[in-house]
Amino acid sequence: MVDATKIQEHAEVIGADGVHVGTVDKVEGNRIKLTKKDSGPQVVEGTGSHEGHHHFISLGLVADIEDGKVRLSANADVAVTFEEEA
């Protein structure tokens, strides 16, 4: 697992395929809290509306932190299925 202290607020979260998943609001425990603005239907297309609340990504999905971006071990379309809602 990566060092969570290296994850910066407002860092972009991308899938293993380089596709945008969200933006870091902050790290809470063993999860990354994504900003509300990135928790809309543009992120989880075809699964209904997820606007207006935060989503979380497990730190276990983080493969690396490179160039200020958080890269996940799963492609974006798979990673969003692991998101937890607040």
Image: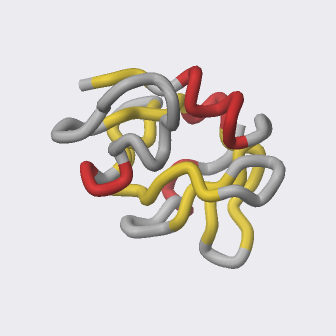
- Residue drawn at the location 77% of the way across and 40% of the way down: 75
Q: How far from the left and from the top, in percent, is residue 22? A: 48, 53
Quadrant containing the C terminus is: top left
Total number of numbered labels?
Answer: 0
Q: Quadrant of the N terminus?
A: top right
Residue 10: give x, y in percent of width and height: 39, 68
- Residue 52 appears in which quarter of the rendering? top left
Left or right of 57 on screen, residue 48: left
| Residue appearing at x 51%, y 37% in the figure | 45
* Quarter occupied by residue 60: top right
Residue 54 appears left or right of 62:
left
| 2 or 72, nearer to the observer | 72
Image coordinates for residue 35, horizontal then vertical, percent: 30, 53
Residue lying furthest left: 52
Residue found farthest to the front: 46
**Residue sticking out furthest to the right:** 17
Name the foreground residue: 38 vs 2: 38
Horizontal side of 73 relative to 34 (left or right) equals right
At 37% across and 25% down in the image, what residue appears?
Answer: 48
Q: How is the image coloured?
A: secondary structure
Residue 49: x and y in percent read 30, 30
Asked whether, in this view, residue 11 is left or right of residue 77, the answer is left
